Image: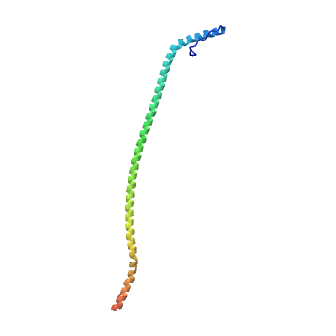
């Protein structure tokens, strides 16, 4: 039998008899307070229900805050993504402008190179003209000033 349900046996000792009477009195004591235990249980359940309700409200409030924070984060992320896309478009436009400028720079460099190639001939032109003038004077005998 379970320990709480087991009744001690009387061995003939007067001390055992007194202990047995106290134990039987205690068993009645449990039955007497069973009704109050149910009432206390109901009170405990009501208090526990209120505590649970408060915890649920706190949890819902916290969940609402987290959802709000999550939505704010998503809105901010979307705004940053839009800004990033705009920045990338501006970067591409700037790169295209730089490419055009480089192409024009290359064209100018080619033009300058062709001019530089012709410069020695231009620098020799006054000597060539002087040489032709001297020949003309020799051949024709006419001096031009």
**Which residue sits at x=42%, y=44%?**
77
Locate residue 140: give its quadrant: bottom left
Judging depth in this view, the residue of 132 and 15 nearest the camera is: 15
Can the viewer see residue 64?
Answer: yes
In front of the other: 136 or 30: 30
Task: Give the answer, above or below, for where 12 lies relative to 97.
Answer: above
Quarter of the image where one finds residue 139: bottom left
Residue 56, given in percent of the width and then of the height, sits at 46, 29
Q: Is residue 93 left or right of residue 38?
A: left
In the rendered image, the vertical position of residue 85 relative to residue 31, given as above or below? below
Work out which quarter of the rendered image holds the N terminus and state it: top right
Q: Residue at x 45, y 32 (%)?
A: 61
Residue 143 seen: no
Residue 96: image quadrant is bottom left
What percent of the width, then of the height, locates residue 105?
A: 39, 65
Give 110 or 72, whichever is nearer the viewer. 110
Q: Nearer the viewer, residue 7 or 68?
A: 7
Q: How is the image coloured?
A: rainbow
Question: Residue shown at 66%/9% (left/top)?
Answer: 15
Which quadrant is home to the C terminus?
bottom left
Horizontal and vertical percent for residue 104? 37, 65
Q: Residue furthest front?
A: 1
Residue 133 horizontal/vertical position (percent): 36, 87
Would you place residue 42 above or below residue 97 in this image? above
Residue farthest bottom in this picture: 141
How many numbered circles are shown?
A: 0
């Amino acid at each position: 039998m379970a320990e709480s349900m087991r009744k001690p046996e009387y061995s003939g000792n007067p001390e055992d008899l007194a202990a047995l009477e106290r134990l039987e009195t205690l068993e009645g004591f449990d039955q007497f307070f069973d009704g109050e235990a149910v009432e206390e249980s109901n009170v405990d359940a009501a208090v526990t229900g209120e505590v649970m309700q408060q915890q649920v409200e706190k949890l819902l409030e916290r969940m609402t805050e987290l959802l709000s924070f999550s939505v704010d984060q998503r809105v901010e992320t979307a705004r940053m993504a839009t800004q990033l896309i705009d920045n990338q478009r501006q970067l591409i436009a700037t790169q295209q402008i730089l490419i055009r400028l480089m192409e024009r720079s290359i064209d100018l460099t080619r033009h300058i190179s062709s001019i530089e190639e012709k410069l020695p001939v231009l620098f020799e032109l006054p000597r060539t003209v002087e040489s032709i003038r001297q020949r003309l004077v020799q051949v024709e005998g006419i001096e031009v000033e």
